[in-house]
Image (cartoon, rainbow, N blue to C red):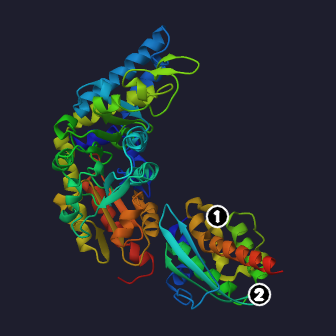
Amino acid sequence: MELQQLYTDLILEYNRDRTNKRKIENPTLSEHGHNASCGDDITLEVKMDGDVIADIAYTGSGCAISQASTAMMAELLKGRTVDEALRLVHLFLDMIRGKATDEAQLEELEAAVSLKDISQLPVRVKCAVLGWHTLEIMLDKLEAMKAEKK
Amino acid sequence: MNLEAIRNDFPILKTQCAGRDIVYFDNAATTQKPLPVLEAVFDYSTHRNGNPHRGAHPFAIAASEAYDGSKETVRRFLHAKSTREIIYTRNTTESLNLVARSWAETHLGPGDKILITIAEHHSDLVTWQRAARKTGAVLDYIYVDRETGRFLPEDLAKIDDPAVKLLAFAEVSNVLGVRFDPKPLIARAHAHGAVVVLDGAQSAPHRPVDVQDLDCDFFAFSGHKMCALGGIGVLYGKEALLEDMEPFLLGGDMIDTVGEQETSFAELPAKFEAGTQYVEGAVSLEAAIRYVEAVGWDAIRSQEEKLVRRTLEGLRQIPHIRLIGPSDPAEKEGLVAFNVDDVHPHDVAQILSAEGICIRTGHHCAEPLHRYLGVGASCRASFYFYNTEEEVDYFLEKLKGVRPMMGYDD
């Protein structure tokens, strides 16, 4: 894989995008995610409005791939329901693992589809999935909380 | 030093990457292996392979000779009194674990202190955390000056506390690159009878070691960071201390007599070497020591100094570079850690890798140090005697391209 294929303009743009790189006041849930070996370290926050992700933001530091990927995720999932978000998170993780390849289906991931080729670069996979994996843990917690209430 | 001849001994350095010989600057992680080391192992496995200290056939005898012979070379290398004081392990980490389990856990208790430094590698830190937790001892730290990388003088006074029963530190920090002269610190700790463990992982490959002159109680190093194969390491320990310790691992070769309920253990050093030993590793270590000594400590030192000086001078000319630890080349031992503004170390390493340059990125197994310095992670270029100034220049040139590649104008 050539460098220019990895560090595309789109990825560099999202890496530097600060729209959702911020703290949320009184978040419903906050979750820390890190890759011990490379020093990627993020805190993801969500604010729920009933079943809908009203706001999603992150802080911390990480490589361009992890930062861009998390920024793309935040943009994609704001305003989605938990079920919808979980479905998209799983679709993204499947794409990175090389399991989901249907291009029409992957279009649903919007900007994040540009990370598809990371599946060919095993050392960067954990960077690409950091934010998504962290959110998956949070959404699972929300589901569990919901089930408890019932 | 004939650099070209030396490089010819390392075929791996001729690996083609990005249209040139690969630039290997990750020597603090592991060094490459010269042909004489590989040939020694090949020769052993081709002609002499057996299980040492067992059996009466020619291969068992040849294996014993190879294993025990290498120990004598290591003893000489460390200037130890006796091969009874030389224990083979897998690496520095295992050596330090051995001391933690077999000495610290049985000799420390509540009210005692273990003193280490904030610059330690995880192997010289996590080990003591557990020893402290198990024994009720307190784990305390000597901190470093964030600019110079030197121990804070007021923290050095902690060594004088009679409650300090164990002092452990790395002679050379694998991040700061600073060397801490161990001798005065050891003497200071000995003044009230503390035991001193020296982590030599980053020093033994680069400078001569004299454990008797240092008077350290334990000294640990890894073969693979000085041209030997992976998987062979050494623990030196003073004989009286080793005699007074429980075995680390139990099994074959480390016993004297075994009954159904009771066992008596073998003499040193076998007491600490359970199971079939890594003779190939021992053979490689002996060959590596001979190789490094043939290159010569003065030549190694002068080449590494040249490389560090050129690197630091070059880095000064590049905007947006932040050095970690001191910037004075006289204060750096063969390695330089740094960051590029706004670019995560992982991306720096990826970009350099595409240009055929191998550096290390991350915490370098020193997370508490990075946190103390307020740095998330870092890049590290580390040298060995086979690296060249031309490689440094190429590295500096490509480093200049990192920020533009990531979309920054300057």
Instruction: Give the quarter of the image for residue B144.
Output: bottom left
**Residue type, label 2:** Asp
Residue type, numbered disc 1: Ser
Depicted B6 relative to depicted A103: above or below: above
- In the picture provided, is A57 more to the left or to the right than A88? left
Vertical arrangement, residue B303 with respect to residue B38, above or below: below
Residue, disc 1: A119
Report, in whole angstroms, how far the alpha carbon at label 2 lies from the one at label 1: 32 Å
Under circle 2, the secondary element is: loop
- Which numbered disc covers residue B400? none
Furthest toward the front, the residue is B111
Instruction: Indicate the quadrant where residue B380 lies.
Output: bottom left
Query: Badge 2 sits on which subunit?
Result: A
Density class for disc 1 (Cα within 10 Å; few <14, some 14-19, many ≥20) is some
> Is residue B46 rendered to the left or right of residue B410?
right
- Which secondary structure, mark 1? helix
Residue at the (33%, 62%) spot, across then down = B395
Can residue A115 be seen?
yes
Q: Do the residues marked 2 and 1 share a common chain?
A: yes
Quadrant containing the C terminus of chain A in the rendered view? bottom right
Q: Which residue is mark 2?
A: A51
Q: Quadrant of the N terminus of chain A?
A: bottom right
Observer able to see residue B286: no
